[in-house]
Amino acid sequence: MMGARTTRVLRMAVVLAAALEASTASALDKGAAAPTFDLPGKDGTVQLAKYQGKLVYVDFWASWCGPCRQSFPWMNEMQAKYGARGLQVVGVNLDAKTDDAHRFLAETPARFAIAFDPAGATPRAYGIKGMPSSVLIGPDGKVLYEHAGFKEADRAELEQVIKKALGGAQ
């Protein structure tokens, strides 16, 4: 017998998989213009265009995603360490119910911008196939780097990519 949480996780996974499969979008090419978005956020509207001129690390996540719990402390660290140099981390939540995202955030706080996309339009535009997935967008609005998943071993590599991009941005 499945518990309510397991049923909810499976239902969301099926919905997300169907939405992603139905999408004609493919992963973005390096150097392509990042699709813009304008989403409701935890602290007001989150617009990608607002961050023009900054290095933007967009992370797609959901409350039921185990590796997302590991990535949040790292993203908080990156925002604190590199924010003054031009980095802006943006977490785009894909939970069908925003309440699920708020419960996650109460347990795993974010010290960066959080947007909500329960319809999943933004990950479709970006060609996201799994979570967490992240896209690094240069100050010119073009895709610099994409990464799927998150594990402890990814931390150093991702930070090097950010540092290199910031060096080129200044």
Image (cartoon, rainbow, N blue to C red):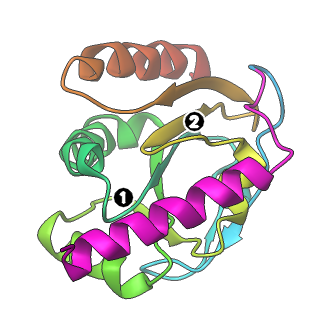
Residue 158 figure quarter: top left
Type of the residue with mark 1: Phe
The earlier-in-sequence mark between 2 and 1 is 1
Q: Secondary structure at mark 1?
A: loop
Residue 71 figure quarter: top left
Tell me what residue is drawn at x 65 percent, y 74 percent. Answer: 119
Q: Which residues are magenta?
A: 1-29
Characterize the local packing of mark 2: few (<14), some (14-19) or many (20 or more) Cα atoms within 10 angstroms.
Answer: many
Horizontal and vertical percent position of residue 124: 73, 53
Q: Main secondary structure of the magenta part?
A: helix
In the rendered structure, find residue 112 and report the number of the disc placed on it. Answer: 1
Tell me what residue is drawn at x 48 percent, y 30 percent. Answer: 148
Tell me what residue is drawn at x 52 percent, y 82 percent. Answer: 44
Residue 10 versus residue 43: which sits nearer the camera? 10
Horizontal and vertical percent position of residue 144: 65, 22
Q: Report if residue 111 lies within the magenta region.
A: no
Type of the residue with mark 2: Val
